[in-house]
Image (cartoon, rainbow, N blue to C red):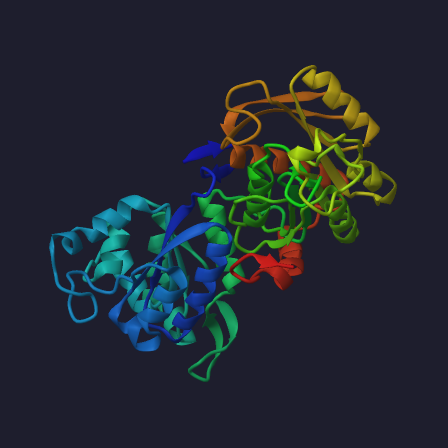
Amino acid sequence: MAALGNHKVCPYGATVKVALGISGGIAAYKAAELLRLLQERGVEVQVVMTRNACEFVAPLTFAALSGRKVITEMFGGETGGAANVESAIEHIAVAQSIDALVIVPATANLLAKMAHGIADDFLTTLCLATKAPLIAAPAMNVNMWENPATRKNVETLRERGVKVLAPDEGYLACGMTGAGRLTSIENIAQAVLATLGVAYDLDGEHLLVTAGPTQEPWDEVRYLSNRSSGKMGYALAEAGRRRGARVVLVSGPTHLEPPAGVEVECVRTAEQMAQAVLRHFEQATVTLMAAAVADFRPVEVHPQKLKKQEGIPALKLEPTPDILAMLAPRRRPGQVVVGFAAETENLLANAAAKLREKRLDFIVANDLSQPGAGFDVDTNIATLLFPDGRAKPLEKMSKLDVAQRILDEVVALRQKSGVRSQEPEERKQKAVAHASPPTGPQKT
């Protein structure tokens, strides 16, 4: 896993891994919501349940949501299968593979075991075996929470570096009112992502991303296009979603699987892409034009396949719609528009000219002549150019890493304009509406 500034970034398609521990409390069912929310942020989740937790929610629920076996026993047993060498060291394997361990809910009993180093089941053994950061979200009766023994255990855990999230106050399942209710799943997710170093600084933003090539038909079977794979645009969509944004991806023809939680509109031609972009542009706060839109299209589209027996046909071309030029007069104050330039010669001069002509906030310049950059590869070598003449060259890195660097600049621009100056809690409240979108790509 590569580190990028304050962000933890994985190779394209990879994920950070978290163990989700669930102990036996009535709030155990809420862990399912946390599981889904973490998955939508690109986190791989391994669920570990205590025996008492299984009395509240069936392990099958979490297995279905995570797509992974749920660990419930230390050495096999009735719910864990037959004991074997693999199961005997499974807690070590999990402990070494995770980037964080979060326990939801953390009962008074579990907090006591953690504080005193008791390891009598898989979850408590995992707490001792892992060197990953620990996060605990307590939930219990108000009297249990306020008991001096519990308060001392919480104090001990915090002194050891465990992040214990204070429970909320309110009506409890036992019928009493007071502190002890599980804090919001959004708060827990924020704590996990912050611990992982995964940025969540685009919550409340609406990203419009274009990706892939366009295909301009010549006859019924032939078309003009380019070698764009769409990987850069898809990486931007994935990175934006991981950082909390609502993302609309307008994609030309590709063979890529859209990132989870991203709304996808599939198009074929430059005209169709222009229409889709204009339709979504008004709602977008940030527009990232990564698609390799064809510059020309045939003037005449033949309804049938052209036959070579008929001789060499004449191919007359005309310009396709200039989508970036169409956006310039429609922009509103604070709206960020980023362009891309893929060149084989005079990279910086051509990119700078496009930056000025299209009135962009900055442009990402790619030198297609360099190995490991441009089309059909998982890496990129880019230079970010700004209107004030600044240039930020980026070394060869994965396209997801490049996407994160681009979004770092976007966040800085939004903060400079004043729209990202709100306190995190206030911005988080505005993001609640899309905090738990559908788990798969939504095609329109």
Please determine whether, in this image, residue 438 is positioned above or below residue 12: below
Residue nearest the observer in this picture, 212 or 92: 212
Please determine whether, in this image, residue 349 is positioned above or below residue 421: above
Can residue 90 be seen here? The reply is yes
Can residue 387 be seen here? The reply is no
Q: Residue furthest top?
A: 346
Q: Quadrant of residue 392?
A: top right
Residue 27 pos. (x, y %): 42, 72
**For the point 82% across and 41% down, which residue is it?**
327
Residue nearest the observer in this picture, 226 or 133: 226
Q: Quadrant of the C terminus?
A: bottom right
Residue 63 pos. (x, y %): 34, 65
**For the point 66% across and 38% down, which residue is it?**
307
**For the point 83% across and 36% down, which residue is it?**
325
Q: Could you tell whether 360 is left or right of 163 in the image? A: right
Q: Quadrant of the N terminus?
A: top left
Residue nearest the observer in this picture, 440 or 428: 440
Please determine whether, in this image, residue 179 is positioned above or below residue 186: below
Residue 316 pos. (x, y %): 79, 31
Q: Could you tell whether 177 is left or right of 368 in the image? A: left
